[in-house]
Amino acid sequence: MKSKLLLLSVCLLLALNSCRSDIESTQANSMDHTTAKLDNTTIHKLLINGTYTYVNEVNGEYFYADDITITPEQFNKLKTQANSELSTAEKSTIVSSFIKTWPNATVYYTLPSQGTLSTQNYNTFLTNINKAFDMISSQTSVQFVQRTNQTEYITFTYSTGNSSPLGWQQNRVNGIKIYNITYPAIIAHEVMHSMGIMHEQCRPDRDQYIIVDINRAVEGSRHNFNIYNDYAGHGAFDFGSVMMYQSTDFAINSSQPVMTKLDGSTFTKQRTGLSAGDYAGINHLYGPVNATSAINGTYTMTTSLANDKNVDISGSSTTDGTSVILYSASTGNNQRFTFTKSDHGYYIIKSKLDATKVLTVKSNGTANGTAVELRTNSNTDSQKWLLFNLGNNGFGFAPKNAPSLRLEVKNGLTTNLTPIVIGSTDQTVQPSTKQRFKLTKVN
């Protein structure tokens, strides 16, 4: 997904650049998780899927980046992912619960109190919060609704820096801190973090577009350049994203930028508004989610193995137990599905042949290779599917009754009549090609 680092306050910039360069090492928890001390900051270095992730802990608060905070529970999930002795299946289940989007694509909010702000600055703050909301919602399905009695919502305070919690969490209020009250796009950036959107330069595919030399970054700032393997980039890498750093951000010496393009050239950042890529990214993240109870329209599910092969209801039958297979693309209702929301993050996948019939894991099975069939909706966990947003790779699907498994084309074959089953994944987030499906709206 798209994202970008916001402007930091002058205080934070000065603090970073005044930090001493020597880091006091502390006892390592394991080879997968080590810690070090830098002034009043504990720097956690976590080895996850072969890549180092840094988290800064300050006074019990965990910073995933300078402007992104995570809960102790989210931090513990990261630590668990860094446990090399944990099975891939267990890690897969952990990833699915690390970050969540807002139910019904609706973000509830309360406006800030005036606090120490002058009346003029307070009115400016309120105006720009609403401009930020309008900026995001103008070209997306996301709605911002003032809170009445909702348990989960975002709120704002004027502060010495810009930061936001990451994503929706049950029974949590997302307290967004804003210093740059005169910049609607900066406020939008922090709101987007609360929506579950990450920094653009932290995409898993970023090394195909930029060179990052974290040795050129000031001590304690490496967490701003983490690669987030549990996220997916949508569209081409977006240098114009409102969520993108510039080359010299956090550089020890501005003549030696932390980031460059592959040809060695540098780039700047913008904070005037969302780019087309930002809007596309939000719509992909929240788009099979909107304000209604179902995805708006009917979709085909095309395997990433072959652009001309779709998930199909065998023989166009609606009898309980009918096999779900791979077959050559057609325009019939046997290859058309609607998605109705169930539990938060989960969907019921209905056949257009009969809206009472849904994709179901056979006999509520949890074994690798269990067939998927069409069956009357009885609201069981074997009929609820968690959608993994894979960016350019479409979507992955995990059944609620077996969250470590994924919907897949059996054995990765592309011949007609190949069964659709659930199978184990060898990667925690980006599954193999046979477990990736692209949703195409057909009406």
Image (cartoon, rainbow, N blue to C red):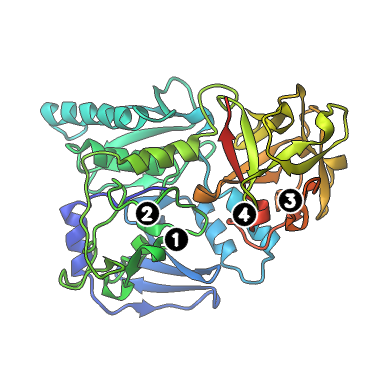
Which is nearer the N-term, disc 1 or disc 2? 1
What is the secondary structure assignment of the residue under circle 3?
strand
N-terminal-most mark, 3 or 4: 4
Q: Which mark is residue 237?
A: 2
The x and y percentages for residue 202 are 40, 58
User: Are dots 2 and 4 in contact, CB under 8 Å?
Assistant: no
Q: Secondary structure at mark 4?
A: helix
Q: Earlier in the sequence, mark 2 or mark 4?
A: 4
Q: Mark 3 near mark 4, Cβ–Cβ under 8 Å?
A: no
From the image, state whether disc 3 or disc 1 is nearer to you.
Answer: 3
Using the numbered discs, state the Cα–Cα distance from disc 3 to disc 4 in whole angstroms: 24 Å
Is label 1 in a helix, a strand or a loop? Answer: loop
Which residue lies under the disc numbered 3?
409
Q: Is residue 247 above or below residue 307?
A: below
Query: In the rendered image, is residue 298 in sight?
Result: yes
Res. 265 mark: none
Count of marks, rendered view: 4
Closer to the camera in the image, 415 or 31: 415
For mark 1, what is the residue? 205
Going by the numbered disc 4, the residue's amino acid type is: Ile
In the picture of the structure, the residue carrying the numbered disc 4 is 94
Separation of disc 3 and disc 1 at Cα? 25 Å
Q: Quadrant of residue 339?
A: top right
Q: Is residue 131 above or below residue 309?
A: above
Cβ–Cβ under 8 Å for marks 1 and 2 = yes
Residue in the image at 20% along x and 31% along y: 125
Of mark 3 and mark 1, the one earlier in the sequence is: 1
| Secondary structure at numbered mark 2 | loop
